[in-house]
Image (cartoon, coloured by chain):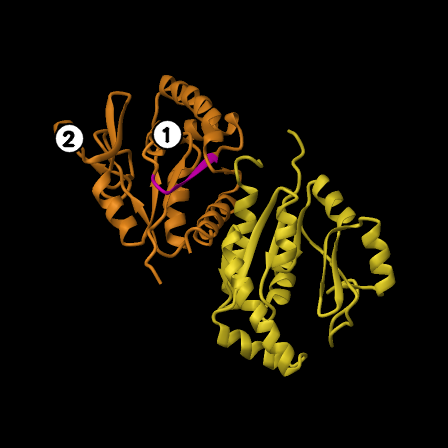
Chain colours: A yellow, B orange
Amino acid sequence: MMKKRGILFIISAPSGSGKTTLCARLVESVDSLYRSISMTTRAPRPGEKDGMDYIFIEKPEFIKRQKKNEFLEWAKFFGEYYGTPKKHILHMLKRGSDVLLSIDVQGAMKIKRLKLDAVYMFILPPSIAMLKERLINRSTDSKEAICERLNIAKKEILCSQKYDYVIINNRLESALDNLRAIIIAERCKTGRS
Amino acid sequence: MMKKRGILFIISAPSGSGKTTLCARLVESVDSLYRSISMTTRAPRPGEKDGMDYIFIEKPEFIKRQKKNEFLEWAKFFGEYYGTPKKHILHMLKRGSDVLLSIDVQGAMKIKRLKLDAVYMFILPPSIAMLKERLINRSTDSKEAICERLNIAKKEILCSQKYDYVIINNRLESALDNLRAIIIAERCKTGRS
């Protein structure tokens, strides 16, 4: 039997949708699914670990890598750079491992243009009010930043139709169950087995 | 929010693949999934219950219904008629319920031509040897009938590529988990939510 290529699972969600927790739980609960860790120049938030949440690097280092075409996609938000390292992902997919990539909507749309065999999943917060509450409770952002994040979130939610799947995160366990189901189902797709 | 239509899940498998058990367990373990019960003129096998495994009817009754166009599809095997009652399925889908229909490959291909919003799943036995063993152990068929069923099975397996999903039934629990995942995932598909 021919060794099959891995599937790239792309997950997007407005900030405050519980994406980080969901992704961490998801790779724990599904076999042979590996997270791709993005690189960023922004400072770690309290509790974030280098190499776990992000690979934190300095700006000149990021720009050097970007010039060497080392990112599948990259972007600048609030003056900081974010990028998806290319080599590791392509290597994992080639050896048949599935990769989970948590990325913002613009990044996901850039990757869509690359026409990789990828599955696009969007996490919806139960409501905008709930999203606002979560952002305030996280209390890592200023009032202005929260307002800006909410505006971005509203725009991002409109893009959810461009994804293959939409999962509403009203209960963590149920959202996790849905994500897990999508990964298992995609592995059973005829073209892939 | 607009009430969404139900999804028709079609499941096929060579005889002896464990399809009956899987379908029964599946509707038990997934919310809001209802089985469509087929009609047949063949005699019940030991343990089969009218209205549960099949609706058992007489040949003249079947032919009357077939002439009144009451079947989504129908077929004749080994001299007996099998049909899928149309009205109940369409009613369930319209009210937003998902329907599970267990049907042979030819029947599934006939339904495919109707262009309903349906998801096609194929259960593969782990091997032809295992399938033969299961058919012998079931001991409801003669040696010749088993041989004929195996030949049909081999042809049906070639058709599995026309299905959306293929599930290998080497362990019941794992096959069940895959089927359950497909149903949950399909419900999260963007076009549907």
Q: Is residue B118 magenta?
A: yes
Please state, as top left, top right, bottom left or bottom right, where the N terminus of chain A lies in the image: top right
- In three-dimensional space, the C-alpha distance between marks 1 and 2, rounded to whole angstroms, equals 26 Å
Query: Could you say whether the residue bearing mark 1 is in a helix, strand or loop?
Result: helix
Whole-percent x, y for residue B25 in the image: 40, 48
Q: What segment carries the magenta color? A: B116-123
The relative height of residue B57 versus residue A62 in the rendered view (above or below) is above
Q: Which residue is depicted at the point 49% across and 76% down?
A: A129
Comparing B131 with A41, the one in front is A41
Query: Could you say whether the residue bearing mark 2 is in a helix, strand or loop?
Result: loop
The residue singled out by tag 2 in the image is B58
Read off the chain for label 1.
B
Comparing A28 with B129, the one in front is A28
Read off the chain for label 2.
B
Amino acid type at image mark 2: Glu
Amino acid type at image mark 1: Met
On the picture, is B3 further left or further right than A113? left
Whole-percent x, y for residue B71 in the image: 22, 34
Whole-percent x, y for residue B21 in the image: 39, 42
Q: Quadrant of residue B51?
A: top left
The relative height of residue B62 versus residue B97 in the rendered view (above or below) is above
What crowding class fits label 2: few (fewer than 14 Cα within 10 Å), some (14-19), or many (20 or more)? few
Q: Is residue A169 magenta?
A: no
Q: Which residue is depicted at the point 58% across and 68% down?
A: A152
Q: Quadrant of residue A123?
A: bottom right
Whole-percent x, y for residue A96 in the image: 69, 41
Comparing A35 with B123, the one in front is A35
Q: Quadrant of residue B121?
A: top left
The residue singled out by tag 1 in the image is B109
